[in-house]
Image: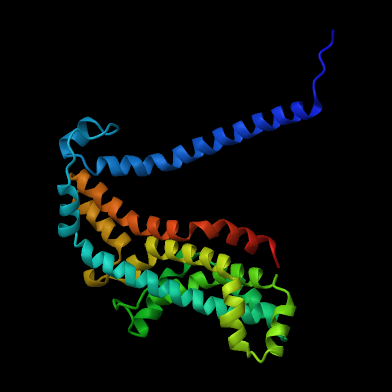
Amino acid sequence: METFINPEMKKKKKFSVKRLIIYIILIAFAVVNAYPILWMIINSFKSNQEFANNQFGFPKEFVFQNYIDAWTTANFGTLFTNSIFICLTATFLTVLIGAITSYFLARFTFKMNRVVYTFFIFGMLIPIHATLVPMFILMRNIGLLNTPITLLFPYIAFHLPITIFILTSFMKAFPKDIEESAIMDGCGIYRIFWSIILPMTRPALATVLILNFIYNWNEFSFALVLINNPEFQTLPLGLASFAGQFTTNYGAQMAGLTMSLVPIVAFYLLLEKEIVQGMTAGAVKG
């Protein structure tokens, strides 16, 4: 006797197997990416002797002194202050300038619209390392080396292209009826931008905020070339010298790296609900 198999049950079974395979792949991918971070955090609580004897196990005794040593000896207070100031200021200015520029590129038609947009997008193709020497000479000639605002200029300039690309693609998808209705109600250009367009662009804004903050927080090349004064060094630059200073104190090194990771993870978790929606919309719309 032949057994009758419901096509819907067969399809559902295939779908369940497919979903199971996807979950396994995603879990494996998450473990591979999360393990180095967990390994770093675990070893930040170990003494040098325990780190040398057992690098992959949990600490037998938590050594919180590593964090105190990392904070005081490596001058982490100054490094954190400089990085937070540079990151927040550069991110705010980049997103503000990018949003205003994207609004006019996406919602207005003028003769050089396409040329201006292409000019900004072309900036995404320029390798940062190729501009280090010209940037150093330029900043030296205008007297902006080793100042609190030295890094703001390259950070804003090199992160504007991706910001404008995402925001312009997102804003182009908005129907023109929205602005026409606002104009009928007596709204001007800037009122439309601040009260209508900008709130509607919230998912894309969350995306560019996260991207800019991550780039600025982790940037090392410009900080290394343009900043020599320890008072104005950022965290990545300070961590490089910190690693060389504590060549045998691995626990303090891990503690310093762990503390440097906290702000960027917190900032990401704050806006992570909208990053997928913003990246998807910015990539396919327009």
The picture quadrant where one finds residue 92 is: bottom left
Image quarter hosting the N terminus: top right
Extreme residue in the top direction: 1
Q: Is residue 30 visible?
A: yes
Q: Residue at x 15, y 58 (%)?
A: 73
Q: In the rendered view, would you say 31 is above or below 157? A: above
Image quarter hosting the C terminus: bottom right
Coloration mode: rainbow
Q: Residue at x 29, y 78 (%)?
A: 147
Q: How many marks?
A: 0
Q: Is residue 109 visible?
A: no
Along the line of sight, the residue nearer the viewer: 11 or 62 = 11
Q: Where is residue 189 in the image (x, y as percent from the top left)?
A: 63, 88
Q: In the rendered view, would you say 282 is above or below 14? A: below
Compared across the picture, whether 68 is left or right of 6 comes to: left
Along the line of sight, the residue nearer the viewer: 136 or 177 = 177
Compared across the picture, whether 256 is left or right of 16 comes to: left
Q: Which residue is drawn at 57% across and 74% down?
A: 199
The picture quadrant where one finds residue 41 is: top left
Q: Which residue is drawn at 68% across and 85% down?
A: 182
Along the line of sight, the residue nearer the viewer: 285 or 165 = 285
Q: Position of residue 273 (x, y in %)?
A: 52, 57
Q: Where is residue 76 in the image (x, y as percent from the top left)?
A: 22, 61
Along the line of sight, the residue nearer the viewer: 112 or 182 = 182
Q: In the rendered view, would you say 275 is above or below 3? A: below
The picture quadrant where one finds residue 34 is: top left
Q: Position of residue 174 (x, y in %)?
A: 69, 72
Compared across the picture, whether 273 is left or right of 175 comes to: left
